[in-house]
Amino acid sequence: GAVVSQHPSWVICKSGTSVKIECRSLDFQATTMFWYRQFPKQSLMLMATSNEGSKATHEQGVEKDKFLINHASLTLSTLTVTSAHPEDSSFYICSARGPGRVRETQYFGPGTRLLVL
Amino acid sequence: AQSVSQHNHHVILSEAASLELGCNYSYGGTVNLFWYVQYPGQHLQLLLKYFSGDPLVKGIKGFEAEFIKSKFSFNLRKPSVQWSDTAEYFCAVNAGSYNTDKLIFGTGTRLQVFP
């Protein structure tokens, strides 16, 4: 149980284009999803917290208009990197947390590797 | 602001050696503590977690961690490592408040185990 998937697993795009990444909880309802970014040989940095049916909360320094998040259903959150540039190349990971206690464990997706040329 | 530090960036061990990975956090209030593992090419998996109660927590695959509040530490241990334990290990903390459940990750420790 508690499986989270991401699609696509990798994407290469031209500078200036927008890229959408999907995060799905396959066997549970995720009231909250999180989006992280991981640079090579570095830790995961939280970008934003996404709650179903409400606006996402972006971390300080993360542009909300650049990294658009939509959590339209209890099993799907999307991250759209708008007008992507080479510096946006990174590994993007989502996690999902089920309903109930706030301290419920986060389950992580396999990540999406983005390369912007 | 909360922060998590993992002192060992890269650890190399032979099979059957004992392992201890350090994790310290900076936050004075109630904390929830986690260790995650990322095997090569795979996603993050939860090894163990501490919310309250017995400060010695046992996780999967023979791992355990001890929460020492006075030292703000949550070190990960395994008495005898295996080649299959080769992976990246991340310590993570959240503030434990009902208003937030954001995880703050350490920089990770890369463990290589040689047969």
Image: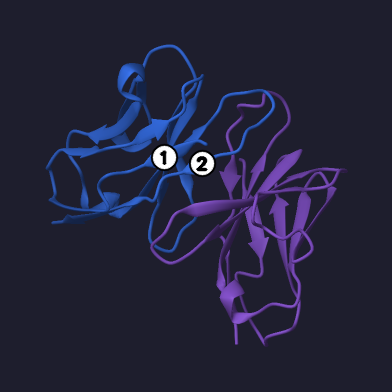
Chain colours: A purple, B blue
Q: Residue at x 88, y 43 (%)?
A: A53
The disc at residue B4 is: 1
Q: Residue at x 58, y 34 (%)?
A: A105
- Quadrant containing the C terminus of chain B is bottom left
Position of residue B28 relative to residue A57, above or below, is: above
Three-letter amino acid code of the residue under disc 2 = Ile
Quarter where residue B33 is shown: top left
Position of residue A46 relative to residue B104, above or below, is: below
| Position of residue B92 measured from the top left corner of the image (x, y, whole percent) | 46, 39
State left or right for residue B38 relative to residue A16: left
How busy is the neighbourhood of tag 2: few (under 14 within 10 Å), some, or many (20 plus)?
A: many
Quarter where residue B62 is shown: top left
State left or right for residue B40 relative to residue A99: left
Looking at the image, which is closer to me, B73 or B56? B73
| Position of residue A59 measured from the top left corner of the image (x, y, whole percent) | 66, 49
Three-letter amino acid code of the residue under disc 1 = Val
The answer to whether marks 2 and 1 mark residues whose Cβ atoms lie closer than 8 Å is yes
Chain ID for label 2? Answer: B
The disc at residue B104 is: 2
Spatial separation of the CA atoms under disc 2 and disc 1: 7 Å
